[in-house]
Image: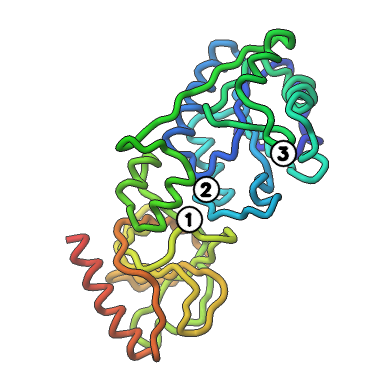
Amino acid sequence: MKIIRGLQNLTQYTGSVVTIGNFDGVHLGHQQIISQLIKKAKQLSLPAVLISFSPTPQRFFGHEKATLSNFKEKQRLLSALGLDVHLIVHFNQTFAQLTAPDFVQKVLLDKLNMQHCLIGDDFHFGKGRQGDFALLQTLSKTKGFTVEKTPSIHHNNIRISSSVIRSLLAQGKLQSVAAMLGRAFSITGTVAHGLKNGRTIDFPTINIPIKRKISPVHGIFAVTVELDGTSYQGVCSIGNRPIIGGKKTLLEVFLFDFNREVYGLEIKTTFKHKIREEENFDDFTALKKQIKIDVSNAKKYFN
């Protein structure tokens, strides 16, 4: 999959099949859209192009949300589905003022020579979010492209969406999250040096900085960790570490029967079961006592 950052880096296309959206988490609804996009692209012998925005319009307008996938995670998920091109448009004040018809003409047609557009049934675009499927249908009659929308996918009569998945993660409902994502929720990151407080209480942890402003999960979890092709079981804390007055969100993992230096390595932490919420403790002795209980509960879950 080719990643193109910015319209200025986009060369003229002789034709394309396009979808547009944030695709945070690349859940089953997103996967359905991309699957149909690729199928249509193959029928027309054209590249399948996904357009997203950086920053997202929500973030640009001050409505920051937790993200289900960081940049690298999203690219891996999209690439695995077989996309040809991911075009990342820089969303700024000038672009925010672009009307929906102008976006269609100046970006989708002039730049990409779009032959077919496929969007989700709730998609809106352009200044004031005035563009929708109905507008695309109208423009398609005179602009020489076709358009279709995909119906929503439901799980237990609930429409699958990134916002619903965020809510379920906050509630610790990991099985429902996995059913909507099509896989268990995970976070991938590079192991960094920490304060090494865990060693002083006999629970050395692997520390992974969270590459996102707001984490979608907080608390204590039973997890599996993939490292160098091997899977390990453990318990993790993801939060601000109130006992030391922490400000940044950090993922800390204690692995069972593990004793290796892994700084600088990339690991994938998969969340299996929420044990409890994060809480503060009066001292490290009290924290150590609670960690022993957490480890016991995690092992009970795996057993």
Real-space Cα separation, disc 3 to disc 2, in angstroms? 18 Å
On the image, the x and y values in percent for residue 80 come to 48, 35
Q: Which quadrant of the figure has residue 156?
A: top left
- Asked whether the residues under the numbered discs 2 and 1 touch, taking CB atoms below 8 Å apart as contact, a structural biologist would say yes
Q: Mark 2 packing: few (<14 Cα in 10 Å), some, or many (20+)?
A: some
- Using the image, determine if residue 165 lies above or below residue 150: below
The amino acid pointed to by label 3 is Val
The amino acid pointed to by label 1 is Thr
Q: Between tags 3 and 2, which lies in front?
A: 3
Q: Which residue is mark 2?
A: 73
- Using the image, determine if residue 269 lies above or below residue 126: below
Q: Which mark is residue 188?
A: 1
Is residue 19 or residue 121 the one in the foreground? 121
Real-space Cα separation, disc 2 to disc 1, in angstroms? 7 Å
Real-space Cα separation, disc 3 to disc 1, in angstroms? 24 Å
Q: Could you tell which of marks 3 and 2 lies nearer the N-terminus?
A: 2
Q: Could you tell which of marks 3 and 1 lies nearer the N-terminus?
A: 3
